[in-house]
Amino acid sequence: MTRWELPVALEASGEFVLCEEGGLIADRGDALTSFDFTGSVVWRAGVGRVFGVPAVGETMMVVATEDPAGLAVLDRATGRILWQIPLERAPTTGPVLRKAVVYVGSKSGLAAFRLVDGGLLWKTGGGAAVGPLTLHKGRLAYIRVREEKSGEEKSGAGTLPAPQTVASRLWLLLEFFEFL
């Protein structure tokens, strides 16, 4: 049995993922670290505060960061940042990768970006994406929060302005996409 430890700073998210050669961990408040199965650090990249589990492809990996709010793609072997883009709002999900597309949720909704350069392909609106993005055989699902404001209630009579109250309800919706 092999056992070793890798320290994780208190300000780090501690999100990690294992892959063939070792793993990746957000072990510092502003960095992602690659390690091998002996516990040795292979590389460390200053990408910002990691949010969610990194998505690992064959030669690249995708990281969502909350401080600064952004998305970064790194070379898996060296940790070199290939591109990094800002997000309009902080991520609320970790990224997922399907073929050449990166998906990530934020307080604005779900967005899809090109893996090769970070170009925006499309985005949804209507509420924050929360929880994990789930991808399986061309199907993507996640939970979306939607706030619904009810009609105005007016009270009072005569010439005085009527006070208005607006109630709101939060809905959790399962949103589903299927890619052919």
Image (cartoon, helix red, strand yellow):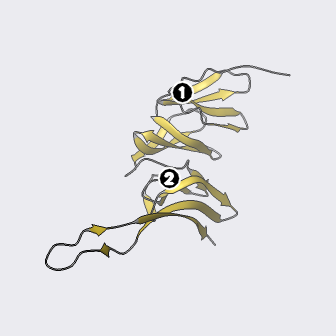
| Crowdedness near tag 1: few (<14), some (14–19) or many (≥20) residues, C-alpha within 10 Å | some
Q: Nearer the viewer, mark 1 or mark 2?
A: 1
Q: Please name whichever residue, 101 or 58, is drawn nearer the observer in this view of the structure.
A: 101
Q: Secondary structure at mark 1?
A: strand
Q: Which mark is residue 44?
A: 1
Q: Secondary structure at mark 2?
A: loop
Could you say where residue 88 lies in the image, as x and y percent from the top left?
37, 52
Residue 123 can be seen, yes or no = no
Q: Residue at x 73, y 22 (%)?
A: 38
Q: Which mark is residue 67?
A: none
Q: Which mark is residue 116?
A: 2
Q: Please name whichever residue, 99 or 8, is drawn nearer the observer in this view of the structure.
A: 8
Residue 39 can be seen, yes or no = yes
Q: Earlier in the sequence, mark 1 or mark 2?
A: 1
Could you say where residue 28 lies in the image, as x and y percent from the top left?
52, 26
Amino acid residing under circle 2: Val
Q: Residue at x 45, y 52 (%)?
A: 118
Q: Please name whichever residue, 111 or 72, is drawn nearer the observer in this view of the structure.
A: 111
Could you say where residue 89 lies in the image, as x and y percent from the top left?
39, 50
Q: Do callouts 1 and 2 mark residues in contact (Cβ within 8 Å)?
A: no
Quarter of the picture holding the N terminus: top right
Q: Is residue 87 above or below residue 163?
A: above
In terms of image quadrants, where is residue 78?
A: top right
- In the image, 119: left or right of 1? left
Q: Is residue 73 above or below residue 41?
A: below
Amino acid residing under circle 1: Arg
Q: Residue at x 54, y 23 (%)?
A: 9
Quarter of the picture holding the C terminus: bottom right
Q: Residue at x 60, y 36 (%)?
A: 15
